Amino acid sequence: WQGTFLMMYVMNKDIRYPMAPERYLVERMRKETQDVFTFELRCADDKDKGFQFAPGQFNMLYIFGKGEVPISISGSPSDTGVIVHTVRVVGKVTDAMSRVRRGDVIGVRGPFGRPWPVEEAKGSDVVLVAGGIGLAPLRPTLYHILSQREKYGKIILLYGARVPGDLLYKREIEQWRGRFDLYVDVTVNSAAQDWKGNVGVVTSLISRAQFDPFHTVVMMCGPEIMMRFTLKEFQGMGISDEKIFLSMERNMKCGIGLCGHCQYGPTFICKDGPVFSYADIKHIFGKREI
């Protein structure tokens, strides 16, 4: 299968070989937390080349000599000139990625995956729930919704982290909080006395937000245990399983459903997800060893 596509790719440059990364230059690098960083990439071979994606999709990022990892795209879908990724250091590839500098080259394959249902959510209230680095995959959704603000009802962002130092995009969160057309609430599990915000799990924020549960779409991303308890809260409010969406990023290796590492029951997370409605996966969600 790979050999056939590679031969087609070599013979016809107009055919895109899905396993061949394109070269992208690191244009900017910013540290978010102690182990999380954000960088911007621009095509190395054509600086004017645009990159289009839908909120919730991901790229496979390749560090030469180290390997590749799936990383959600965390920038604005309307800014096609650069690709933005927020990455946590969790292994040898992401550790090497954290050491790149401006002008270094990274391989990029993508975008891949099923996006958030931003079109289906038009006309409804939208509640975004993020835990830790789970805000990164939801950030493009918020950008997209705010760019078409009049097409949606109430927009609510509920964000939780382990400690204040783990919060992402602090300056941007303060800007969002200053908007009259967006409700933002943030909490941490534990904090020192100098922390002036909420302390508690992210589910504690749900009852304080005002939205119509019968006309609401929920999108959430974070640790699985967080999503499990958050699900119960929304179900208890009457939100249907078809209106609750989760990002199930895990174990992805190829991005195109070839290797089988991310098989999740009868589906492959990389090509059938990473975004799923809870109605589609509730028969296997939370089951051990799946």
Image: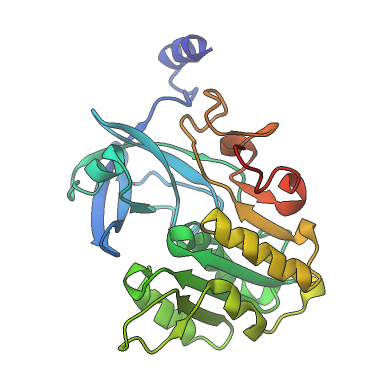
Tell whether 33 sits left or right of 7: left
| Residue 76, visible in the rendered structure | no
Please tell me how many numbered marks the rendered image carries. Answer: 0
x, y (%) of residue 250?
51, 42
Quarter holding residue 74: bottom left
Image quadrant holding the N terminus, namely top right
Left or right of 35 in this view: 246: right
In this view, 8 is above or below 117: above
Q: Residue at x 63, y 64 (%)?
A: 229
The residue drawn where x is 45% and y is 17% is 9
Quadrant in the rendering for residue 96: top left
Give 48 or 213, whichever is nearer the viewer. Answer: 213
Q: Residue at x 18, y 46 (%)?
A: 103
Which residue occupies the foreground of this view, 223 or 273? 223
- In terms of depth relative to the viewer, which is nearer, 51 or 37? 37
For residue 244, say whether it is visible. Answer: yes
Q: Residue at x 33, y 46 (%)?
A: 90
Position of 252 with respect to 203 (left or right) is left
Percent from the top left, x then y, of residue 107?
A: 32, 35
Asked if residue 86 is positioned above or below residue 209 in the image, the reply reads: above
